[in-house]
Image (cartoon, helix red, strand yellow):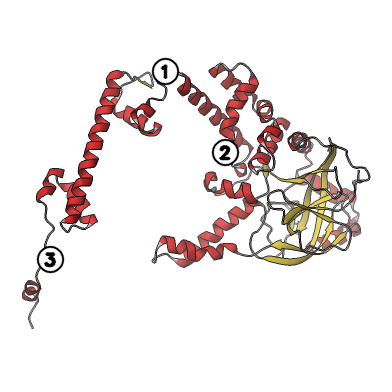
Amino acid sequence: MPELRDSQPSGMMLTSTYTARVGHWAETLEDEVAAKLGPNVDRARLRSLLKEAAGEIELLAGQRFGPVERHTETIDPGGLPFVDVPSIHVAAYEVDKEAWAVPDPADPTRANVLQLGQFPQLADRAVGLGDALWIAGHLIAAALKSRRLSPEYLQWLVANRLDHEQRLAFFRTLIDPAFRVQIPIAATSYGGWWIQVSRRLLWVTHQTPDEHRLVEPVFGNDEKLRGLVAAEPTLIAARITTHPVKKAHIVRIWPPVHRASRPWRLVARAIHSHGIPIVSIDQNSTPEEVGCQLVLGALWHGQVEAGELRLANAVASAYPTAVERIKRSVGAPDVQSAAALLLEGLLHPGFDPALGAASIRRYVNRKARIAILEHRKADEPGGRVWESLGVSERFYYKLLKRHAPKVGGRYQVDDQVLDQIRRYLRHQDSGAEKRRAALDLMRERGFTEPAARKWLQRHRFEAAISARPRRPASSSSRRADAPTQ
């Protein structure tokens, strides 16, 4: 395996050119969205909202979208064999030393991982990606427990691994936005996979391009060093059975963050199709939770098949309390069956990783309650009464609120209540048919749609037989009412 070393300015690798997706792609949507909103839309306001939405989508995706542009970067990998470089165009990149772009599984025309070194010995075979990510979750949890993901660890590296002159030279190189320095955090090998965690160190200035990644100040209280930041930690798991590597999985590691969240169901599909997975952690995250998030994220991003991951075991290990509650409530024969029942609710669209690990735990507990309720509805006699009534479950409970008595916090439903609901539904259907017939009759007689609806709000349906629209005042009457000179 490659030897790990500290990141030093003397250990640089140069990539002469690579291409990255950049540009304000949101501006191309302005005309399309404006056409849907109507001619009175405020273009300036619309443009601002589109850029705001685009920025959030790019942050969740971990990369920028738009036209292809050529850049030159100098890379110091810190002794690691892989480095994350967002949106490399596989067909157009060039390097001055040996390096290979690993195609992204979702889009083989681009890559987010660059391989910089060769492995002296390749593995004959490798375990599945799910098993590798499970081990990667334990590696992340160990780095979290040892505080290697904190700014204090980076402060210690800068203070103890570099003398004064080296430190000044190091900071000068970081000011250059084309200089990419990776700090090794942790690394291991398992079952034919190389697994590493690293962070990029950079100095933020007005010239620093925005890659839409989270950054964290390294010296937050020092005014002179406030520009020194560390990007979000990244996990790279690469299968080392061939050279160059053909498969590498990259994941961004997010601490608890706060953002103005849009409904996840609206952006989940786009992020899963084009974005880099995110795993959310906090101080209460267990190795099993992190590993389960990693394998679920790989499934949502379409990088593995569900059968490869043995997800039921991962869910049971990560959330034992929720699984045990399901097992006890539905009488499941074993833990795996209860975990499979919970997993059905976790498959799509998944949880929003940007809301943090605590939110994910609440999400899983809510899905456990829903799984128990759904199981009871399916097994209990008459459990899905709304289907026999021809209404949705939500509308059924609205009808219960109107027609059924409530005792001890539960609605008492019997044949009499159901007959009353059926009569109400038949009456509503009859009223809707009468309303449609009255509207059709009034439109034939010259009523406009708004005028007919307004008339029916004030009169009975039967009165529509004799209804006539108001005649406009004659031109002679308007002339007679006009003031005279």
Mark 3 or mark 2, which has the lower sequence index?
2
Question: Tag 3 or tag 1, which sits nearer the N-term?
Answer: 1
Q: Which residue is mark 3?
A: 472
Quick one: SS at disc 3?
A: loop
Asked if residue 22 shows in the view, the reply is yes
* Percent position of residue 130, x then y: 73, 35
Secondary structure of the residue carrying tag 2 is loop
- Residue at the image point whose x is 57% and y is 31% from the top: 344
Which amino acid does the dot numbered 3 rest on? Answer: Pro
> Which numbered tag is attached to residue 381?
1
Q: Position of residue 194 (x, y in %)?
A: 83, 42
Please tell me whether mark 1 sits on a helix, a strand or a loop.
Answer: loop
Residue beneath disc 2: 348
Residue extending farthest to the right is 120
Q: Position of 254 compared to 466: left or right?
A: right
Q: Amino acid at mark 2?
A: His
On the rendered structure, is 470 left or right of 376?
A: left
Front residue (pair 332, 58)? 332
The reply to whether dot 1 and dot 3 touch (C-beta < 8 Å) is no
Displayed quadrant of residue 468: bottom left
Marks 2 and 1, the one that precedes in the sequence: 2
Q: Are marks 2 and 1 in contact (CB under 8 Å)?
A: no
